[in-house]
Amino acid sequence: MLDTIFAIKFVHMIAMAVMFGTWTSIALFTVLAYRTGKTSVVALTAGFVIKAELTLMIAAIALQPLAGFPLAAAIGAQLTEYWIEVSTAIYAGVVVAWLANLIIELRMRKVAQEAALGGEPLPNSYRGMFRLWSGISAAGLAGMIAIMALMIWQPHWS
């Protein structure tokens, strides 16, 4: 049984690490590109960011519950335990935040590419999207940190 628990936990932790690492890296690359003030750098980075999200984040987001719920069952936890319910609710919020950010990133990429092709600076609409994206990113990353804390702590409040 311990081998099964280890295997499921390993998949769950790898998926969490990929999800957190990808989102953190994407946030860093997007902010650094924006800070260059170079439209072409922002446009190129936006393309890479979206490719990374579509390949890494989708897989990690899918694996989390596919490994997490069997892991809870394997360790004898009930799905109605406080930490699992709260983690699941926060996870749902993180996924919604990620989807919102992906939609914003697609718009940001389009605006940046159009500006780069026209040889123009980033328009004010990009700056507004960037601010919104930044706030959602911070909330999503905070949610992931909270989930990791709950996974480790596993409080049993009623």
Image: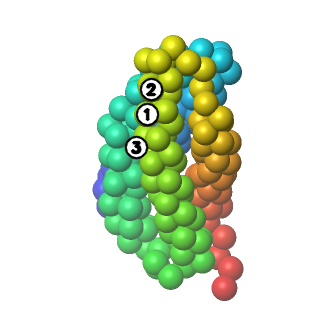
- Which amino acid type is marked by label 3? Met
Identified at 61% across, 30% down, the residue is: 123
Identified at 54% across, 75% down, the residue is: 85
Residue to which mark 2 is pinned: 114
- Which amino acid type is marked by label 2? Glu
Kindly identify which numbered label has been placed on residue 20.
none
Measured along the vertical axis of the image, is residue 90 above or below residue 49?
below
Measured along the vertical axis of the image, is residue 23 above or below residue 83?
above
Residue to which mark 3 is pinned: 57
Identified at 50% across, 23% down, the residue is: 115
Q: In this rendering, does residue 42 appear at all?
A: yes
Colour theme = rainbow
Taking 80 as reference, is 64 left or right?
left
Foreground: disc 3 or disc 1? 1
Taking 130 as reference, is 60 left or right?
left
- Which amino acid type is marked by label 1? Lys
- Say which element carries label 1: helix
Identified at 46% across, 78% down, the residue is: 79
Percent across and percent down for residue 15 are 41, 45
Kindly identify which numbered label has been placed on residue 110.
1
Q: Reading the chain from its start, which is encountered first: label 2 or label 3?
A: 3
The crowd level at tag 1 (other Cα within 10 Å; few <14, some 14-19, many 20+) is some
The crowd level at tag 3 (other Cα within 10 Å; few <14, some 14-19, many 20+) is many
Percent across and percent down for residue 144 are 58, 52
Task: Name the quarter where the C terminus is drawn.
Answer: bottom right
Taking 82 as reference, is 49 left or right?
left
Residues at badges 2 and 1 in contact (C-beta under 8 Å)? yes
In whole angstroms, how far apart are the C-alphas of marks 2 and 3?
26 Å
Taking 148 as reference, is 114 left or right?
left
Measured along the vertical axis of the image, is residue 8 above or below residue 106?
below
Residues at badges 3 and 1 in contact (C-beta under 8 Å)? no
Foreground: disc 2 or disc 1? 2
